[in-house]
Image (cartoon, rainbow, N blue to C red):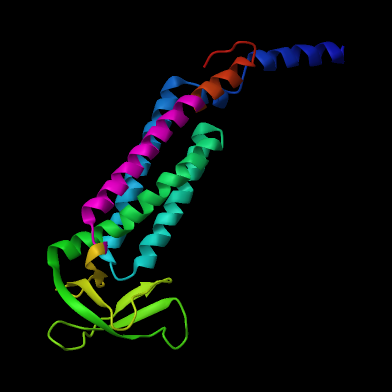
Amino acid sequence: MSEGIHGSTTAADASHPPASARRSARPLTAVYRTAALVLYVWAAAAVVCGVSFLLPSAEWVAISVGVLLCVLFGTLLHVLHRGVWLVLLAAVPALFVLVGAVQYAPELALERYGVHDRVVVVADSAAATGGKNHQLTLRGSDGRKLEERLVYRGSGAPRVGARLDVVRDSRGKVPMERADQVDAAGRRGQLIGGLAVWTVLVLLAGRRGHVSRRRDLALYGGARP
């Protein structure tokens, strides 16, 4: 008697999937999820650009926010796709999105409000320690030392005596940069290109995730959403 009851219950479960599985496999649900993630992609980039605009001298804040939003995007993409390989593909354009979003606002400000100057490096804070965080003291074209220092992180810093072309913010809000490294249009191109690739990956993830959910639903005796 118990075996008969158990068998009929199993058959009923196989032909009646949970309501959550039905809703998840609906085409309209897939469209909503995909559209929401596309909006998230562009909104996240706008947030990082906004943080970079409001705090141009604290680049680490914009970078931290950007990394957090990129990790969250990867998680959401994995949930939408139900796979890992698209998340791995999204890592490369993530670099373009992050760099573009962090650098675009400050470099645009330097292009609009910057003052170009030909300077000479007269001192390096890392010369004695051999570190990779360089704060370069500069002498301007008028022969006077600049109050602001040029920050350079990493190896290959300009040596003492080197001549550089720099751009300084006339308002004093954006840190000084070397003139040949200020390219707001290039940063914008990086940002839009990375976001475009992300958008394509989201659309692909939405399609493949929907197919996967429909396939799982078919295991319930051909049930429909």
Residue 4 lies in what quarter of the image?
Answer: top right
Please state which of residues 15 and 32 is positioned toward the viewer in this rendering: 32
Residue 217 lies in what quarter of the image?
Answer: top right
Please state which of residues 123 and 88 is positioned toward the viewer in this rendering: 123
Please state which of residues 27 and 59 is positioned toward the viewer in this rendering: 59
Please state which of residues 49 and 193 is positioned toward the viewer in this rendering: 193
Q: Is residue 53 left or right of residue 80?
A: left
Q: Establish if 215 lies above or below 90.
A: above
Residue for point 40% across, 45% down: 93
Please report the bounds of the magenta region as a residue range.
181-208
Number of numbered discs on residues: 0
Q: Is residue 147 visible?
A: yes
- Whether the magenta-drawn stretch holds residue 189 is answered as yes
Q: Establish if 133 lies above or below 35.
A: below
Q: Establish if 121 lies above or below 31.
A: below
Residue for point 42% across, 34% down: 202
Residue 56 location, x and y as percent?
A: 28, 67
The N terminus, quarter of image = top right
Residue for point 52% across, 17% down: 225
Residue 156 lies in what quarter of the image?
Answer: bottom left
Mainly helix, strand or loop, the magenta region?
A: helix
- Whether the magenta-drawn stretch holds residue 31 is answered as no
Residue 49 location, x and y as percent?
A: 29, 55
